[in-house]
Image (spheres, grey):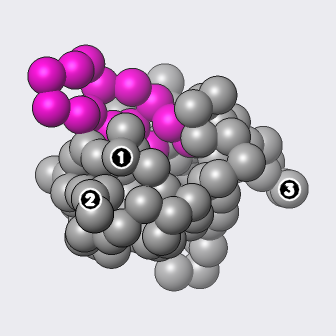
């Protein structure tokens, strides 16, 4: 079982990044996928989630609502997090989490840094 995040990097305020979370070794399409982040010195928080229904339900934390968009392509075993209008306080390590009652998998995280 593996979850791999990609797409992190450094960007200026107002910029955009698209994170990807690709799973293997399990039935990716049967899992709800969540993006969490952890900023330096702070706890981990969930910022977005997408369900398995058709069309999938989505959730966004208030801090990212209107700026982040989560989507999934189960044919590619991948969930995307499109991040726009990034702010300094979006700086964090972003983690992908595949969750169901019978399984819970985490990636290693990808760093997003917003700086001028």
Q: Nearer the viewer, residue 31 or 11?
A: 11
Q: Position of residue 83 (x, y in %)?
A: 53, 61
* Residue 38 location, quadrant: top left
Residue labelled with disc 1: 88
What kind of secondary structure does the magenta stretch mostly adopt? strand
The disc at residue 16 is none
Q: Position of residue 23 (x, y in %)?
A: 36, 65
Q: Residue 15 lies in magenta, yes or no?
A: no
Q: Residue at x 29, y 47 (%)?
A: 91
Residue labelled with disc 3: 55
Q: Nearer the viewer, residue 29 or 9?
A: 9
Please, is residue 20 above or below residue 64 in the view?
A: below
Q: Residue at x 51, y 36 (%)?
A: 47
The disc at residue 115 is 2
Mark 3 secondary-structure assignment? loop
Instruction: Give whichever of discs 1 and 3 has the lower sequence position.
Output: 3
């Amino acid at each position: 079982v593996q979850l791999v995040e990609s797409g992190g990097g450094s960007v200026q305020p107002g910029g955009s990044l698209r994170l990807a979370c690709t799973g293997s070794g399990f039935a990716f399409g049967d899992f709800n996928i969540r993006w969490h982040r952890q900023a330096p010195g702070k706890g981990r928080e969930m910022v977005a989630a997408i369900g398995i229904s058709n069309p999938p339900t989505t959730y966004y934390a208030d801090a990212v609502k209107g700026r982040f968009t989560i989507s999934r392509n189960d044919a590619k075993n991948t969930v995307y997090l499109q991040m726009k209008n990034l702010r300094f306080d979006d700086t964090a390590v972003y983690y992908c989490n595949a969750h169901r009652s019978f399984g819970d998998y985490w990636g290693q995280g990808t760093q997003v840094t917003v700086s001028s």
